Image (cartoon, grey):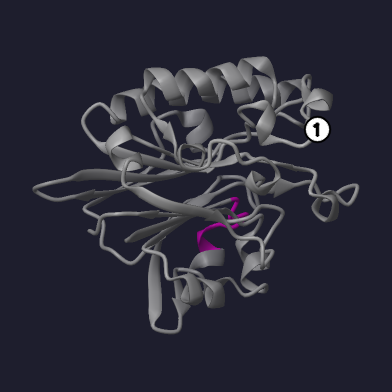
Amino acid sequence: MFKLISLNLNGIRSAATKGLAEWVGQTRPDCICVQELKAQGADIVGRFEEIAAPAWAMKGHFHYAAKKGYSGVGIYTRHEPSDVRVGYGNPEFDDEGRYVELRFDTPTRKLSIISSYFPSGSSGDERQTAKYRFLDSIFPHLHTLRADREVVLCGDINIAHKEQDLKNWKGNLKNSGFLPEERAWLTRLLQEASLVDVYRHLHPDTLGEAYTWWSNRGQAWAKNVGWRIDYQLATPALAALARQTSIWKDTRFSDHAPLLVDYDFTL
């Protein structure tokens, strides 16, 4: 099996103090896509270039934000990629450190694994408008990429797709992350770019167990008032190889929970 994990760290330094490396050694993924590093290259070098769990070292590839302590994504891998793509060609959002892609190309497979952190619009109209600009720009990139490659996009998408994907959906109909325009965009991506929501593919009816993020306010974690905003979106042939998926809640590294998927292939 090829084990792929997506996790918003909400700060790599913070997550490291909560046993991230030990957990990686326990779960033994092939790749782990991380978001919200909240770190720059100087913070990573000599400390987080690898996750050096016992007998399970993984090398990291990163996209840092220009703004200190902001955003940033990475992919740790056990396998040597054939190519690393940092950014997706949009200067505004590449400056924010939101996209890194590892390519694993062989004579029989062309595979792209992406770690991406979509903007949040919850801080106000300006950031919501920026979020829409990001969605408009990333859509054609993903559509073109998946035309001749197997693709799995891992990340914090900052959109709960359907009513079953958050606890209080009625109270959030006018809030960023559950706006009709955002949800319609995700529906369009799945349909027109022919991507599959792997978790929902395997668990179409799961409700409260599906949440991956909980606010730090109002005892949201204790009351399980959560949102499902972390995804693995895969091309159909790849999604068909997904055998099992889970959301890890035994250890809290951040306000997000890791999303794990086992695919029936090897590199």
Query: Would residue 140 be found to the left or right of residue 125 on screen?
Result: left
Query: Residue at the bottom extreme?
Result: 54
Is residue 259 in sight in this rendering? no
For the point 66% across and 35% down, the residue is 165
Residue 231 position within the rendered picture, expressed as x and y whole percent measured from the top left: 52, 41
Residue 70 position within the rendered picture, expressed as x and y whole percent measured from the top left: 64, 48
Query: Residue at the right extreme?
Result: 218
Q: Residue 32: which quarter of the image? A: bottom left
Query: Residue at the front extreme?
Result: 205
Quadrant of the image containing the C terminus: bottom left
Query: Would residue 266 be found to the left or right of residue 168 on screen?
Result: left
Q: Tell me, yes or no, whether the highlighted magenta stretch contains residue 106.
A: no
For the point 47% across and 43% down, the residue is 202
Which residue has dot 1 on it? 168
Quadrant of the image containing the N terminus: bottom left
Relative to 80, residue 181 above or below: above
Q: Amino acid at mark 1?
A: Asn
Q: Main secondary structure of the magenta part?
A: loop
For the point 33% across and 34% down, the residue is 235
